[in-house]
Image (cartoon, rainbow, N blue to C red):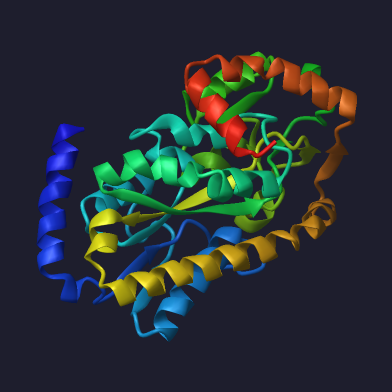
Amino acid sequence: MKYKKQIFGAVMSALLAFSATATAEVKIALDSPQNLQGSGSYVWAHTFSTYLNDKGMKAEEYQRGALGGDDELFDQVSQGLLEVSMSPLNIVGSIDNLIYGLRLPYFFENSAEVDHALYEGGMLAKINEKTTDAGVRVLAVNHVGHATGIFNTKRPVNSVKDMEGLRMRALDESQIELYKAWGATGTIVSWAEVPNALQTGVADGYLNPAFVPLLFGHTDFIKFYTEAAISPSLRITIVSEAWYQGLSDDERKIVDDATAAANKANREWLKTQDAVVKKLEEAGVTVSVMGQAERDAFRKASAPAYESGLISDEQIAAWEAAKGK
């Protein structure tokens, strides 16, 4: 970490000295197809880039994977080599794990509660207290669908018991622990390898918002979806802190205003997502709607996720207070 801070300090000094070139081109690394109907992440990115261009700050969108994988993009942002990246939540978890509060199962009731905690409750600012020291600013948290559900290739899941024997694709070790608590198993698979893993049986399913199999063409092998509403479906926009601080006051205001416009567009897009479940059914996916008793059983079984050490009791309390209840 000290080495990262040294690198960040050197890059910051260089960029501040040559701030006039800071906005020669704002590169935006996308994390999804350029689909304004199906991708909330792209709605955010495209609104942001359009606003910058309209205000005279040249911005260019780069297709998913064109500038590297998530880890490579994170390194480029932290070193000031890339201005903006659409990224997963956990990419900044290596700096500070406070952001993992957004992944706690059955913690938030709805998207409005998430936004209240982040903005009115000050949790986004708290996240940035640590990340900016390492050269990365979390500029925004983006909704990419309604709360996550359970997809799989094997059978309908209507209860915790139905999870037994399923091998699920995991983002990281913490998600593997959650699967264990539900009686399933997990295996870490990069997103690029997910289609092959599902078709060969390396993984039987994943947790994601309803739009994902439609957007990425997985409905040929994903056949079952459960509306389990486990946790918010979120991605983040990270930017180079060196770049951000190297902007003039006028440029920074344009970036901040572009962020506000992108946030608004993203939330408006979220309101359109009720129709996605019907599209899944039309694509041949069997949809199960979990009853309250079954949802309560999943919530109870998820308790180990709160005790895993991924996030501390104090951090959970901070998120609880920020929800405003």
Q: Quadrant of residue 233?
A: top right
The residue depicted at 31 percent of the width and 62 percent of the height is 83
In the image, residue 64 lies at what x, y percent?
Answer: 44, 59
Above or below residue 171? Residue 87 is: below
Q: Residue at x 45, y 37 (%)?
A: 90
Rendered view: 309 above or below 9: above
Q: Residue at x 39, y 70 (%)?
A: 255
- Residue 74: image x %, image y %? 32, 47
The one of 66 and 22 positioned closer to us in this rendering = 22
Question: 97 above or below 255?
Answer: above
Quarter of the picture holding the N terminus:
top left
Residue 170 visible? The answer is yes
Whole-percent x, y for residue 125 in the image: 43, 46
Q: Nearer the viewer, residue 183 or 232?
A: 232
* Quadrant occupied by the C terminus: top right
Image x and y of residue 174, in percent: 51, 23
> In this view of the protein, can residue 164 be seen by the observer?
no
221 and 7: which one is in front?
7
Please report the residue visible at 56 percent of the width from the left and 63 percent of the height from the top: 263
